[in-house]
Image (tube, grey):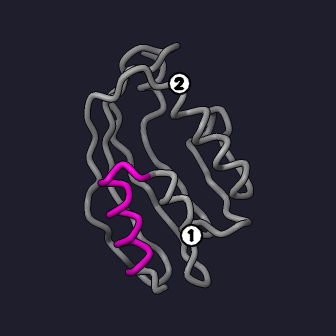
Amino acid sequence: MTTQEVAEKLIKLCRQGKYDEAYGLYAEDAVSIEMPGVPNERTEGIANILKGFENWANSIEEHHSGTVGDAVVSGNHFVVPMTSDATFKDMGRCKMEELCVYEVENGKIKTASFFYDPSVFNG
């Protein structure tokens, strides 16, 4: 798949809430990078990324709303703006805006980097 095709498929799956399927777009040796100081700041390998997603999903008490914007594609990278409003079991309600930057290699997501204000998790 081209970078544009990966971006379009990821956005479609995320908008449908099919996050488990979206991770099928990741390479086996993919890397996920969160903001500095956030737990699991760097996660390597799809198996570990999936474990992290499962832990995150299980920490949500209620999902209020969220958006997945349109991709901007440049070469083998694309960026997608996303928002989330959720209540977490241990942190309470958090409203978050982020930019998700993806690098595509051989038709798969090789690197996913997430940019947001980490203070939203500190109340």
Q: CA distance from mark 1 to mark 2?
A: 25 Å
Q: Is residue 22 left or right of residue 111?
A: left
Q: Is residue 107 left or right of residue 17?
A: right
Please rate how many residues cluster around mark 2, counting C-alpha atoms within 10 Å: few if below 14, some from 14 to 19, many from 20.
some
Q: Position of residue 51 (x, y in %)?
A: 67, 42
Which dot, 1 or 2, sits closer to the camera?
A: 2
Image quadrant holding the C terminus, namely: top left
Q: Is residue 33 magenta?
A: no
Q: 44 or 27, which is in the foreground?
A: 27
Please rate how many residues cluster around mark 1, counting C-alpha atoms within 10 Å: few if below 14, some from 14 to 19, many from 20.
many
Q: Is residue 18 left or right of residue 26?
A: left
Q: Residue at x 49, y 50 (%)?
A: 114
Q: Main secondary structure of the magenta part?
A: helix
Q: Residue at x 34, y 63 (%)?
A: 11
* Res. 84 image quadrant: top left
- The residues colored magenta run 5-18
**Residue carrying label 1:** 109
Which secondary structure lies at badge 1?
Answer: strand
Q: Is residue 9 magenta?
A: yes
Examine the rendered structure and indicate whether residue 110 appears above or below residue 84: below
Residue kind at label 2, given as amino acid type: Ser
Which secondary structure lies at badge 2?
Answer: loop
In the image, which disc is placed on residue 59?
2
* Res. 40 image quadrant: top right
Residue kind at label 1, given as amino acid type: Ile
